[in-house]
Image (spheres, helix red, strand yellow):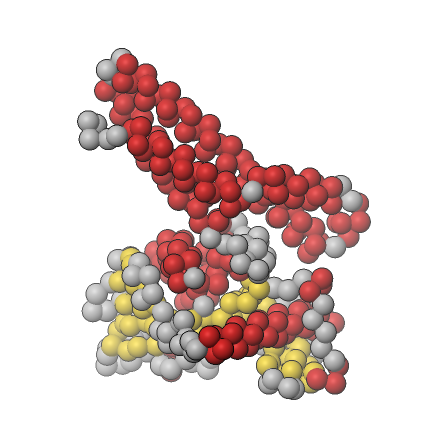
Amino acid sequence: MAGIDFAAEIAELRATLETITTALDPESLRATVDRLTGETGDPDLWNDPERAQRVTSSLSQAQADLERLTRITAAIDDLEVLVQLGVEGDDAATLSEAETELESLRTELAAAEIRTLMNGEWDERAAVVTIRSGAGGVDAADFAEMLLRMYLRWAERHGYPARVLDTSYAEEAGIKSATFEVDAPYAYGRLSVEAGTHRLVRISPFDNQGRRQTGFAAVEVIPLIEQTDHIEIPESEIKVDVFRSTGPGGQSVNTTDSAVRLTHIPTGIVVSMQDEKSQIQNRAAALRVLQSRLLVQRRAEEAAQRKELAGDIKASWGDQMRSYVIHPYQMVKDLRTEHESSNPQAVFDGEIEDFIDAGLRWRRRQA
């Protein structure tokens, strides 16, 4: 206990809180809460369930940010009083309680700090994630499905609405590709650091000789655009194919040509959608994803041009950003941040928040 300089620790907490408060801008948050609260009072809002979901989610996020700042401010004040009582009364139990509260505040501030790292142009958007199997045959396809489950479990843990938009199943096991949407505030900001090449090393369950195999999967993350973004695509630039949905059966599945594949002729970008029951709904959903990808491509081209003009053409992402090793040892390690876990099963069960947080801090350092 004697080794803790509470005065210095509390001063550091207040300095960190001030930095976070400046970044989050409480006045702006209050204005956002007022605006969104007004929107929720509009009876017509609920005629559009997707827009209503976005408005209520954004309102909840802004209210949570404000409440967190208020709570942390009060907690630091309470800690200061607790320390004063402990010191004046030479009360070891009170000082021990203060030490516990100090650790809790450090954790709370670290979580609040992560929120300030998501201030990019698209970070507050919902996310569209596509996972594709790469080199490694059936093990890569199985790995891609493991990653799909991992991200869906992560979303479930946080209460984020997520739905699979399209799945292409591999012949033997796993998936060739899958696209899913996470419709929550700052989903793109968080998941964007997951983009890149992932590698799995394990004893293959598909190898009758029990040999160690390596499989690769690519993760693509794009922000979901909104109607206000106005990305216009001429009809003449889109090729539309319709086909019957594949995969597990269900109502209206495999019975009509409801699935839609859009091909953007100038770029070759292909988007398939089969989640909805009607062709019209699938086409609208596919168009939104296509618009999102074109928007991201345009931004990437602009960024590449700026880098070239600056004389720096080195890519900021390597071919392999994270390794999941199950044999000969147990380890998941991010090669950018050096963050690691010795429990791959927990990671595949969706416990990836620490990897995401480390990725956000790494991205800030790179910037």
Which residue is found at the position 34% from the left and 77% from the top? 215
Tell me where residue 188 appears, x and y as whole percent. 53, 60
Compared across the picture, whether 80 is left or right of 188 comes to left
Tell me where residue 44 appears, x and y as whole percent. 80, 49
Which residue is found at the position 70% from the left and 43% from the top? 35
Position of residue 23 relative to residue 127, above or below, is: above
Compared across the picture, whether 221 is left or right of 272 comes to left
Compared across the picture, whether 221 is left or right of 277 comes to left
Tell me where residue 359 appears, x and y as whole percent. 39, 59
Which residue is found at the position 72% from the left and 67% from the top? 230
Which residue is found at the position 57% from the left and 60% from the top? 121
Quadrant position of residue 241: bottom right
Position of residue 288 relative to residue 135, above or below, is: above
Confirm whether residue 72 shows in the render: yes
Tell me where residue 252 appears, x and y as whole percent. 68, 70
| Front one among 266 and 44 | 266
